[in-house]
Amino acid sequence: MGARELDLFSLAAFSLLLLVPVAIFFFLRIPRIRSLLTGFLRMVIQLALVGLYLETIFRINHPLINIGWILIMVAVACAAITNQSGLRLKRFFWFLAAAYLLSLGAIFGAFFIVLEPQTLFSARYLIPLGGMILGNIMRSNVITLDRYFHGLQKRQEEFISRLSLGATPWEARKPFMADALKAAVSPQIATIATMGLVSLPGMMTGQILGGNSPGVAIQYQILIMIAIFTTATVSAFLGMVFASRRAFDDFQRLRPGLFRT
């Protein structure tokens, strides 16, 4: 038995709960009311359109179409990551896309250990799994790229000092990469350590609402958490490595115009 379909009128009435945070923002004079309401309106419109697309994709269920949708998701993720981290899209898009596609391709290859190819390439598996993984890639990579490049910018003298003392470019960048990656993965490690005690994660909740037993839901949740953490870490690392090829000139100086004004 699947999850019960919600009545649209009831869902609209439930959305009135947003008036509570709006009232708090208004009381504290936090200038985020417009962005909050605009963000939720965009979310509703985007999810409605995506729902229509997915209904069609699920009905057709062709592997090439499913993979094409994943590629579109990767492109959108690259644009969002560069935007949120303050980098220029046109300078880093292809480097970051390569890092994310390699990471995603590797983890989907690993899925063959537990899932049959015809199952994995089914729209009902490939697209939700890809969406969950890409969503976490976005969060970790925004933090990583922001910390990495702004750290290099603010601590440029430290970076140059390491080079002048005989360090290779890789050795000089390594501490900045470590700081950035640590900042990105620490919240995820904390979430993993408390999962099941503090919260029931989305994958598990969705499986239970969909009618599966808690035991099956737990198996899929363990699977997706391993995939998410591995892909987020690898993609963040490769993102820094690949982006560095574009960011530095022949004298190991940050190129001008890397950041959006």
Image (cartoon, grey):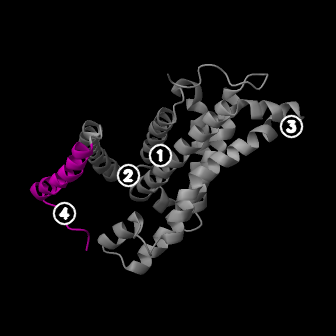
Mark 3 or 2, closer to the camera: 3
Quadrant in which residue 96 is drawn: top right
**Of the pair 3 and 232, the residue shown nearer to us:** 232
Q: Disc 3 or 2, which lies upstream in sequence? A: 2
SS under mark 2: loop
Look at label 4 and name its amino acid. Glu
Q: x%, y% of residue 197? A: 44, 75
Mark 1 Cα shell of 10 Å, populated few (<14), some (14-19), many (≥20): some
Residue position for label 4: 5
**Of the pair 36 and 24, the residue shown nearer to us:** 24
SS under mark 3: loop
Tell me, yes or no, whether the two marked residues, 3 and 2, touch with CB atoms within 8 Å.
Answer: no
Residue position for label 1: 67
Residue 31 visible, this angle? yes
Residue 115 visible, this angle? no
Residue position for label 3: 167
**Where does the magenta region start and end?**
1-28
Q: Residue at x 49, y 71 (%)?
A: 194
